[in-house]
Amino acid sequence: MDSTLIIEKSVIILVVFAITMLMAMYSTLAERKVAAWLQDRIGPNRAGKGGILQPLADGLKLFAKEEFEPDTPNRFLFFTGPALAMTTALMTSAVIPWGDKFHLFGRDIILQATDIDVALLYLIGVMSIGVYGIMIGGWASNNKFSLIGAVRAASQMISYEVAMGLSLIALLMMTGTLSLREISAQQAGLNWNVFYQPLSFFIFLICAFAETNRTPFDLAECETELVGGYHTEYSSMKMGFYLFAEYANMFISSTILAVLFFGGYNYPGMSWAVENWGVNIANVIGIGALFVKICGFIFLYMWVRWTIPRFRYDQLMHLGWRILIPLAIVNIMITGIVILRAEIFAYLGF
Amino acid sequence: MSIESISLSGRKKVVSNKEMSFLERMYLLAIVKGMIITIKHLFTRKVTILYPEQVREMSPVYRGQHQLKRDELGRENCTACGLCALSCPAEAITMKAEERKPDEKHLYREEKYASIYEINMLRCIFCGLCEEACPKDAIYLTTSKLLVPSSYDREDFIFGKDKLVMPLDIAMKNAQLKNAK
Ligand code: SF4
Ligand code: SF4
């Protein structure tokens, strides 16, 4: 492997890491702002112009807080929990194609940390590890509220993972590849998957809400019943890590939604831009388009949060097992029939 | 008309417990409706008052900290009759009367005045009965537009004449305004 590749990938990884952190940071501000606006308020506006420095102030506050630790026999696990949550939240970003090829310094640069051909499988895998952070933290806290929160999170994740996986199978049958780069490339122009697989998108969206523990599925940390849920015993920056991981997760799942169903970095007229303005400029616009889509999804997350009340736990399980999973299976069947329609028609003798 | 169907407010709604239809059971329509309602609020005028810079206008009948009035010549109105203390349901007012000396005519309007006048702001319930009881127009809660500030010690909440009597310059200004009209 030549050293330029290593440098190139390191730079990409660093930039992606920084951007994920930045987005997570500013999601916290956006969340508060959106909440305020939807409730006819203004929201934080004292730190910096229009509250632009609020995330820094929040971070500083969390750092300065007393590091409190419950009397737990699992000290090691207590520290591992938040670290794991953060790690898995950041790991997912490795396979996401942030843009098409750049042509710089006489070589093609792919805006992706790594282009593995089982990217989608990797995503689902890493996302399901994410629950370990919550589970270990909740378990090690030695507190019944934390434990119930953790148990809830775990069973919720498992239930919705099934529906999520099934909804993606329908998508896979259509794309025929697990590589996110190829899936993005297939959606050039306005050939976005959401138009071909609306049901799949819908199921995936609901499952994404559940996987990120966002309202209406935030039973793992519902304040009204469980104090703070799995992070009840956490304080200072460990608590900050959990909150941060949640927002990082939200950013990543918005990205996945945008890449899988909304064409990733593609925008209408991209091929025209490549011809007339060159690859690099077209790509910069593409990255911009991707981020517009991501921000749109993040806004959707917040919008839903401040609209819908929380599900009851049995309703949540009912929705997952008895509605979404059958729906996903029906979707797979319909997709199969549509793909094989020529053969079926031939068989029936039309 | 039977009693069940009367609606005085005109907004009575009979709660029904009927089976929901399939569309209703999906909740999707309801969720979309809810989201349209919330997004409308994104564009409505915000009701926040940016407090230290903007201060909410007080209602004309707002009852804040008491003020002992002066007349146009700057003399104190109160004659220490004690009617306010008598009317106070919270027993918040105490005072000590004193006879006016000949050389104090410019200070007190009546022949008797309150040398000590204290209101315990922790007892006071800001009912305004003292204002209603006063025969000399001497005590008002509505004009000062002051809030009683917080403090750490109970002693700080016993307001004497130093805090209650209207400042002289304001009294003179009021008098000028009145004359100018
Ligand atoms: S406002 Fe009411 S409670 Fe307060 S001093 Fe006057 S009469 Fe007493
Ligand atoms: S404030 Fe009014 S009611 Fe109270 S003692 Fe003075 S004159 Fe009498």
Image (tube, helix red, strand yellow):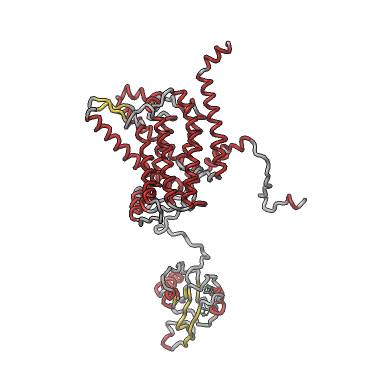
- A88 relative to B97 in the view: left or right: left
Q: Residue furthest top?
A: A349
Q: Residue furthest front?
A: A73
Q: Residue, x 29% and y 34% (percent of image)?
A: A12
Q: Which one is nearer the viewer's eye here, A230 or A211?
A: A230
- A236 relative to B17 in the view: left or right: left
Q: Which one is nearer the viewer's eye here, B10 or B33?
A: B33
The quadrant where residue A312 appears: top right
When the figure is inspected, residue B112 is found, relative to residue A320, above or below; the finding is below
- In the rendered image, residue A174, in percent from the top left (x then y), is placed at 46, 23
The quadrant where residue A120 appears: top left
Name the quarter where the C terminus of chain A is drawn: top right
- In the rendered image, residue A328, in percent from the top left (x then y), is placed at 53, 30
How many labels, in total? Answer: 0
Q: Residue, x 53% and y 20% (percent of image)?
A: A337
Q: Residue, x 36% and y 35% (percent of image)?
A: A93
Whether residue A109 is visible: yes
Name the quarter where the N terminus of chain A is drawn: top left
When the figure is inspected, residue A274 is found, relative to residue A24, above or below; the finding is above
Whether residue A293 is visible: no
- In the rendered image, residue A205, in percent from the top left (x then y), is placed at 48, 35
The quadrant where residue A23 appears: top left
When the figure is inspected, residue A251 is found, relative to residue A120, above or below; the finding is below
- In the rendered image, residue A45, in percent from the top left (x then y), is placed at 39, 51
When the figure is inspected, residue A10 is found, relative to residue A221, above or below; the finding is above
Q: Residue, x 29% and y 38% (percent of image)?
A: A14
